Amino acid sequence: MTNKEYLSQVYHLELKIKQLQLRSEEFERLSNTVPGSNYDGIRVDGTHNQEAPYVKWIVKKSEVDNKIATLQKELERLKVEILEVIENLENEDHKNVLIMRYLDIQTWEKIAEKLYCSTSTVKRWHGQALFNIKI
């Protein structure tokens, strides 16, 4: 794993959590709907499911919410670990660039604006920081 891939883990984990949160919201929406009877279909005798139709969505939402909670704990652990690695750098500008880019997930332009320098300088500091960081 390269230094950049290591630092990018936070972004990918946050993206996964956001996707799961969207799925959870959809399951929440589905669990609040009650489908009507279907009189157009062919009637089939046999065992009838006694469970309310919205129950499966509640169960799925619960499963997704548990997974989100687990991933959020992992995200916090990962952020602390990456911050410790970044803090081992000597140059403060390099530290700031890596923190803003990989922990705060900011664009090059935002970082340059906050550090009062050009985007090319930020990218140069980023390259130097990636070269100097030790995982």
Image (cartoon, rainbow, N blue to C red):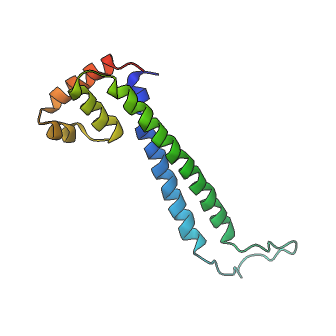
Is the residue 39 above or below the residue 54 in the image? below
Task: Please state the horizontal and vertical placement of residue 50, each as a whole percent of the image.
Answer: 79, 74
Say which residue appears at 39% left-offset and 23% top-offset.
3
Q: Position of residue 76 (x, y in %)?
A: 46, 42
Relative to 68, does residue 93 appear above or below in the rendering? above
The percent position of residue 88, horizontal first and vertical second, equals 34, 23
Work out whether 114 lies above or below 81.
Answer: below
Q: Decide if residue 9 is in sight here.
A: no
**Residue at 62% of width from left, 60% of height from top?**
62
- Residue furthest toward the right? 46
> Left or right of 70: which side holds 54?
right
Q: Position of residue 89 (x, y in %)?
A: 30, 22
Q: As rendered, which of 24 and 40 lies closer to the eye?
A: 24
Classify residue 116 by image quadrant.
top left
Q: Quadrant of the C terminus?
A: top left
Rendered residue at 34%/20% (across/down): 133
- In-front residue for pair 131/82: 82
Location of residue 37 by image quarter:
bottom right
